[in-house]
Amino acid sequence: MTDYGEEQRNELEALQSIYPDSFTVLSENPSCFTITVTSDAGQDGEIVETTLRFTYTEEYPDQAPLYEIQSQENLEDGDMQEVLTLLQQQAEENLGMVMIFTLVTAVQEKLNQMVDLMKNRKEEEKLRKEREAEEAEKVLFQGTVVTIENFLSWKAAFDLDMAELRRRRQKEEEQGGRSKLTGKQLFERDHNLDTSDIQFLEEAGNNVEVDESLFQEMEDLDLDEDDPDFDPLELGSEED
């Protein structure tokens, strides 16, 4: 008949000798203890660490011990699940033999692998950021690729801006008043101006006063309007 208590006591003594700095007894009945497992340091000094809690069952080692992760450092949720899965596999494979050292050794190797994976993850992350920076730089120098969709969108916005600009200019001209416009501009804006003066004269009738003195000296001038070289501007310059 197997003396489970004896086997458990012997294993506890061996574990205390193997892990003097990381082994801690929590209780004696049932026997419960923790062992802290730390990976080897990575290239940049990074480590992963976990504290495993074991509790002997009544018929251990014919039954698997109870185990759990009490604490961890630098382990993600997926990493911890991998550790628990590994403990279950090792416990099933080693039933009938004291197995805590075997379980801890397997976890130690697993943590070392995780440190290597951390290094690979960092390198992949670095490469990913470099690729993103290169793509961003290409976009900066190449500009936005013109497609039918973004051209039509730009054209619609441009047309709206131009319509608003024309509306503002027209409003400013109206507020500035007709007096600020040239004759040509007035004529272009109001084609009735060519008949407005005639209409004004017709409506004024005899009320229009004419200064006849302006025309007195014209009678004394010898004007030959049929002369092809006739130029009234030259007459004005001669009188001066």
Image: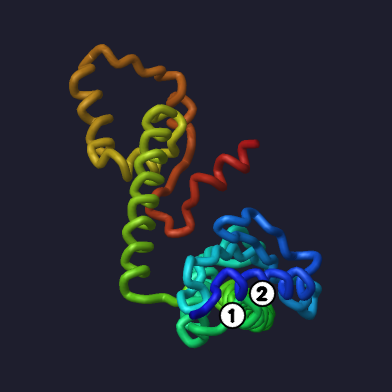
Badge 1 density bin: few <14, some 14–19, many ≥20, Cα 10 Å? many
**Left or right of 107: which side holds 19?**
right
Q: Position of residue 149 (x, y in %)?
A: 31, 70
| Residue 20, above or below 27 | below
Which label number is shown at residue 63? Answer: none
Q: Residue at x 60, y 67 (%)?
A: 75
Identify the element where label 2 is drawn: helix
Pick whichever, 89 or 11, lies toward us. Answer: 11
Question: Residue drawn at (29%, 16%), measured in percent from left and top?
Answer: 208
- Badge 1 element: loop
Residue 11 got which mark? 2
Q: Quadrant of residue 157?
A: bottom left
Contact, mark 1 vs mark 2 (Cβ under 8 Å):
yes
What residue does disc 1 label?
A: 98
Residue 25: in sight, yes or no? yes
Q: Is residue 38 visible?
A: no
Which residue corresponds to the image point at 41% horizontal and 17% vertical from the top-left? Answer: 211
Other-residue count near label 2 (Cα within 10 Å), few / some / many at <14 / 14–19 / ≥20 = some
Residue situated in front as seen by the camera: 6 or 137 = 6
Tell me the amino acid under the disc marked 2: Glu
For this orientation, the residue located farthest to the bottom is: 93
Closer to the chain start, of discs 1 and 2, is: 2
